[in-house]
Image (cartoon, rainbow, N blue to C red):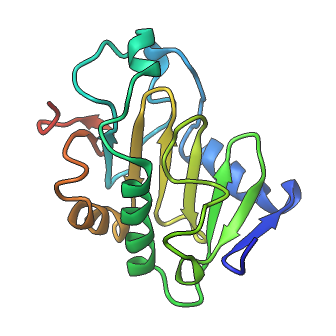
């Protein structure tokens, strides 16, 4: 592990998980009728990472390819995190039912493997400001990435332009921009 990532115990990450369950009303589910499974804050944008108009409850949707590559989303996220975090700031990196971390974006290497990726390939992944004012929540079964907070949303929109084209929801409501 490098200096950017500090593994934390379940006791240390409790305040972050309490915030996720309380403020986001986090309710994980593999069932499409229960998605998104959390309350999307305002402001927020939720990008659809799936490839086109597949039935979200089908096996083809769950097992098929993504519309964007994991490294593209990671590159956008790292640039956005660095833009909105000070040089000494840290964020929570939460991996549902797995090891959590404190991560310092300005110490991260763009090419290094992240213990918790922003991209939600197989589980829920959350990145939260230490004061919970902004963050991301990747939903593995809905195949979406929700970005929230006054500082982080505009950074993601600008940095993700052309890569993250499909906004599924804005501020928790269906987006007029959705395909």
Percent coordinates x, y for residue 135 in the rendering = 48, 59
Quarter of the image holding residue 142? Answer: top left
Residue at the far top in the pictured view: 58
Q: Residue at x 58, y 22 (%)?
A: 29
54 with respect to 23 (left or right) = left
Q: Residue at x 17, y 54 (%)?
A: 162
7 with respect to 115 (left or right) = right
Query: Is the residue 17 above or below the residue 108 in the image?
Result: above
| Quadrant of the rendering where the C terminus is positioned | top left
Percent coordinates x, y for residue 164 in the rendering = 25, 49
Percent coordinates x, y for residue 121 in the rendering = 52, 38
The number of numbered discs placed on residues in the rendered structure image is 0
| Quadrant of the rendering where the N terminus is positioned | bottom right
Q: Residue at x 21, y 66 (%)?
A: 158
Query: Is the residue 104 above or below the residue 114 in the image?
Result: below
- In this rendered view, identify the residue nearer to me: 63 or 141: 63
Q: Residue at x 45, y 69 (%)?
A: 78
Quarter of the image holding residue 13? Answer: bottom right
The reply to whether residue 178 is in sight is yes
The reply to whether residue 57 is in sight is no
Residue at the far bottom in the pictured view: 87
- In this rendered view, identify the residue nearer to me: 76 or 153: 76
Percent coordinates x, y for residue 5 in the rendering = 70, 71
């Amino acid at each position: 592990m490098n200096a950017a990532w500090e593994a934390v115990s379940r006791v240390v990450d409790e305040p972050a998980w309490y915030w996720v369950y309380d403020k986001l009303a986090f309710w994980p589910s593999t069932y499409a009728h229960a998605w998104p499974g959390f309350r999307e804050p305002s402001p927020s944008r939720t990008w659809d990472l799936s490839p086109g108009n597949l039935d979200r409850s089908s096996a083809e949707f769950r097992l098929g390819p993504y519309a964007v590559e994991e490294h593209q989303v990671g590159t956008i996220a790292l640039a956005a995190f660095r833009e909105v975090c000070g040089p000494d700031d840290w964020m929570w990196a939460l991996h549902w039912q797995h090891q959590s971390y404190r991560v310092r974006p300005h110490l991260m290497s763009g090419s290094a493997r992240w213990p918790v990726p922003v991209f939600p390939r197989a589980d829920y992944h959350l990145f939260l400001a230490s004061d919970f004012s902004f963050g991301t929540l990747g939903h593995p079964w809905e195949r979406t990435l929700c970005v929230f907070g006054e500082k982080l949303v505009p950074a993601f929109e600008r940095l993700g332009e052309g890569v993250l084209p499909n906004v599924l929801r804005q501020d928790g409501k269906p987006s007029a921009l959705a395909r």
